[in-house]
Image: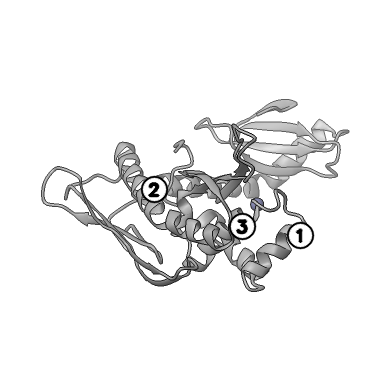
Amino acid sequence: MICDKILEDREFGHLYIIVNARAVRYTFRPANDGTPQVGIRVTVPARYDLKDLQLSVEKMRPQLLAMLQRSQAAKNKKSEQPRIGWDFRIETDCIHISLMKGTGPKYLLHRLPGQIKMDEQGEVLIMKPAVLEIYCPPDCDFEKKIVQEFIERAIVEGIRNHAKVQLLPRLLAYANRYGIQLNEVKINSSKGRWGSCSLHKQRTLLNSKKSYNINLSLFTLLLPLHLQKLILLHELTHTLYMDHSPAFHAKLDAWLGGKEAELDKELKKYKTTIFSFVNEENPT
Ligand SMILES: [Zn+2]
């Protein structure tokens, strides 16, 4: 943390003073300096008076202490709870994932492919979700970081496999419907974007038909079917418009039967919750 001054405090550890030209009063927040010693971050106006600040701290001491205790309690709770445990479940349109109590010391995977019936236009008629059951040793210790990481990887890889099998044929069917030529489609593990599209650089000028590369995040598979369609058609629309111009949205909206805005709004709800079982520290 970059701060302008550090004061020692008998109860709080440290007061980290940060001058902010736009501040009009003192603002106190728990300091997150990564040390077990908890401190307080104080934002102060440019021309602050140290004596006055110290007086304020004394006056507010009970409230500040309570603030630190709340923050510490929240932190402890967060680190105590394993993200993945026996009750872990993902149940979406396309995939059902659960943890099962095994009988031996080994982890085993039980997989069943999903069953999709599509019409020629790429619309899903019947969808039976894929199943991924992860059998864990009965004495599996979910408190252990290594266990969390191992199971998380099994889940992510399971989703990746099914994403390939389920999303690609649908993307290709839509592309076919709109006469779009794709060069390569890849599944990645992006948590920031559901998909991306780029023009494939042709090696020869003789081939005049343009083709495109599309990347899809494996997490797209966890969305409801109608939102997956939004993602797939969004990327295909980029083969016509490489921006988010009004023309782009007009085309996409037409392909979605006038529902783009409504679907976009619904998609926002999934932006963070869908990755909640993935540890942000793990680069996947
Ligand atoms: Zn876009």
The spot of residue 249 in percent (x, y) is 71, 61
Looking at the rendered image, the quarter that the N terminus falls into is: top right
**Disc 3 to disc 1, C-alpha distance:** 13 Å
Residue 247, can we see it? yes
Depth-wise, is mark 2 or mark 3 nearer the camera?
3
Which kind of residue does numbered mark 2 sit on?
A: Arg
Which kind of residue does numbered mark 1 sit on?
A: Ala
Looking at the rendered image, the quarter that the C terminus falls into is: top left
Mark 2 / mark 3, whichever is N-terminal = 2
Tell me the element at label 1.
helix
Q: Residues within 10 Å of mark 1 (few under 14, many from 20)?
A: few
Which kind of residue does numbered mark 3 sit on?
A: His
Say which mark, if any, is on residue 61: none
81 or 121, nearer to the observer: 121
Residue matched to label 1? 247
Residue 22 as seen in the image, left or right of residue 8? right
Residue 274, can we see it? no
Q: Which residue is drawn at 59% across and 45% down?
A: 211
Say which mark, if any, is on residue 234: 3
Asked if labels 1 and 3 touch by Cβ distance under 8 angstroms, the answer is no
197 or 201, nearer to the observer: 201
Mark 3 / mark 1, whichever is N-terminal = 3
Residue matched to label 2? 160
